[in-house]
Every structure is written in structure tokens, then in C-alpha cells.
Amino acid sequence: MNHTNSLTGLTMTGPFNPLLVVAPELPLHKRGRPPVMLRRALSTAMAKIDACDQGSLRVDELCVLAGVSPRTMRTAFQVTLGMPPSQYIRRRRLHLVRGTLQQHHPGQTTIAAVAHRFGFHDPGRMAADYHSLFGEYPSDTLRRHEVEEEVSA
């Protein structure tokens, strides 16, 4: 049997399958995983990320937990949040570092200890990423907290 696709003008031989004929014209999100699956994967991953305040969480663990492939997980994060899951996890950890530093005085903790607590094993790299995200270094955040308390006293 020969069938001509009215959209592309191509002639197909064999049994006619309208899904195969239309699929090339659909946007990518219509050909990939259903949006429900992407939302469910993202929701599962984000719940785990939010529940885990330590830095040992890895993307492959999220994939196993959500029951999806790494590619599907990347797609869910990229489409919804505009970044891959690894970047989201890193930013989340940086926010946890910032929150902790804002609650302590310089004599109460060290930046290296806080960085290590949230899974950053290279404090210099963490400080550079922190500066890139927040526009200040972790030491500035820690010092500012001390200055704010002196002013309010």
C-alpha cells in the first residue's frame, strides 16, 4: 500500500500509521515524554532536594527515585527551571550556605565548615560560585551579620 502524506508530500509504503506521519511536524515537547511525566519527575526530585539539607545528593539518585532516565530529568529541569538539575542542586546548596552564614557570627563558625556541611569540598570554588550568585563573598555575608547586630544594639 502506498499513502501520500498531505503535510509533507512524501509517499509511504506499507500500513498507514497517522502518528508516524504527523510526528515529524509536532514540536519536540509533543514527541518526548508526556508533560505529566516531566512534572511528576520534577516534583519528586524537588521534594527530595528540599528535604536533603546536606550536599551528598546526586542527579542519578534523583533519577532512580523518580523512575526516569537522566535525559528525562535534565529535560524536566531545563524546560521548567531553565537549568540542569546539577545546577539547581548547587544553587540550592549555595542558598543553604548563605542562610547559615546569615545566622552566625564570625567567631561562631567558619566558612570552610559551613561549605563542607553542605557538600562543598573546595571552599575557594564555593566562594567563587557564591560571589557569582549573590554578588558578595561568603566572608562579606558573615561580617555583615555581625555589623547589622552592632548597629541594632
Image (cartoon, helix red, strand yellow):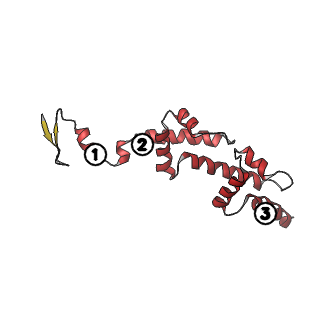
| Front residue of this view, candidates 21 and 146 | 21
| Residue 146: mark | none
In the rendered structure, the answer to whether residue 131 lies left or right of residue 65 reads right
* Residue 131 on image: x %, y %: 67, 60
* Label located before the other in sequence (1 or 3): 1
Q: Which residue matches tag 3?
A: 144
Which residue was labeled with disc 1? 24
Relative to residue 68, is residue 128 drawn left or right? right
Quickly name the residue at label 2: 35
Give the CA separation, mark 2 to mark 1: 18 Å
What is the distance, in whole Å, between disc 1 and disc 3 at their CAs? 56 Å
x, y percent for residue 152: 83, 65
Quarter of the C terminus within the rendering: bottom right
| Amino acid type of the residue that numbered disc 1 sits on in the rendered structure | Pro
Q: Nearer the viewer, mark 1 or mark 3?
A: 1
- Which secondary structure lies at badge 2? helix
